[in-house]
Amino acid sequence: MEATADGIFIIDAQKPSFPVIYSNPSFNKMTGYEGKDILGQNYFLVYGKSADSRLISEIKNRIQEGKSFNGEMLSFNKDGEKYWNLLRIAPVRDSHGSVTHYVGIQTDVTLIRKMDLEVKEQREEILHVTRVGKLAEFVSSLAHEISQPLTSILSYAQAAQRMLADRESEIKGILQYIIDDDHRATEVIRRLRALLKKGSPSIEPFDINLLINETVVLIGTDVIVRDKVILTDLTANLPRILGDRIQIQQVLLNLISNSLDAMEGNHSLREILIRTALKDIDTIIVEVKDSGCGIPSQDIGKIFKHFFTSKSDGLGMGLSISRSIVEAHGGRLEAKNNPDGGATLYFTLPVGKAP
């Protein structure tokens, strides 16, 4: 009993205070007490005030009824550190059948529980990755299928425009709208496929302000449908950034989309402000500020983790991928709540440095 790794203790069943009359070194180590401090103490106090009160009551009831207990409980040692405890308590009876003592054995199964939780989390991540992978395949296939009718629409519109070349007609203007929208839709598909395909990023210098303006146009229809407004405050003559403009645009689209979602259902919260500035001589900062619901304080450190999402239909991949893209470009993506409500997600990008 003195040498075993299991914690062993004996409780005096004759006294209502459940005093411990024996404890081995392993039990003392688990609970954090010296042996002399445990002897005579109420057994249930050694698990701390934070222990599960319902489970403690169940154990007490089993003891008072002269029955055994076998189960797992979350326990706390003297310093408040928690550990998982596989507990077995059995009555010891005298020759007349009366319970005189209770002998308990407990095993620290904290590592096993942690491993179980890790396996569960890994299993959930694998399921998420599988779903995301299938979604990417579907979107890539869909993009390919949509490209074909868009090409036909463009051809017909251009042919009709040529037939009306010598006529003044409102139809010509309508056809031009069709052609312009077709070009925009085709560009969306092209960029989508570029994001999904495997391969090396396209590294080139680009103007971050110009990219922001293009992105605002790209998501403009969604903004109008949601009855929201995007404002910009872009510092002029910023130095160019060296990187993959498609990937950075994906970051912008994700941040704007999140801001739109944060303001969903509240018509008084309408504005998104996108701001650029030179943070220092070789770093540009981009901010996407909304007037939405903000980020719960307990979640602000989790939103960039894989598969974390506050949306019922979310995959929890957008911000994680966005941070990876920004970090691959030598920058950093962060979030903060605004004093006047809403949240700001902002990222930095180095000037003229290859990823």
Image (spheres, helix red, strand yellow):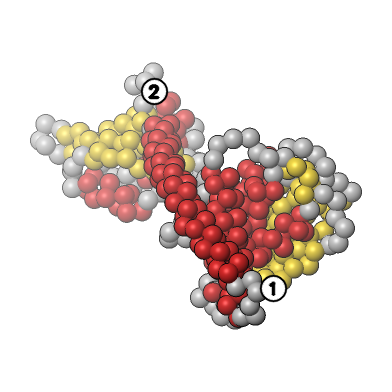
- Pinpoint residue 350: horizontal percent, then vertical percent: 79, 45
* Quadrant for the C terminus in the image: top right
Above or below, 165 against 304 in this view is: below
* Quadrant for the N terminus in the image: top left
User: Measuring 33% from the left and 49% from the top, which residue is drawn there?
Assistant: 56
Residue wearing tag 2: 5
Residue furthest left in the image: 96
Comes first in the chain, label 1 or label 2: 2
Left or right of 59? Residue 322 is right
Q: Secondary structure at mark 1?
A: loop
Amino acid at circle 2: Ala
Q: Nearer the viewer, mark 1 or mark 2?
A: 1
Left or right of 266? Residue 278 is right
User: Measuring 49% from the left and 58% from the top, which residue is drawn there?
Assistant: 152
Left or right of 57? Residue 26 is right
Give the alpha-carbon distance from disc 1 to disc 2, as whole Å: 56 Å
- Pinpoint residue 216: horizontal percent, then vertical percent: 66, 64
Res 235 seen here: yes
- Pinpoint residue 14: horizontal percent, then vertical percent: 25, 42
- The numbered disc on residue 340 is 1
Amino acid at circle 1: Asp
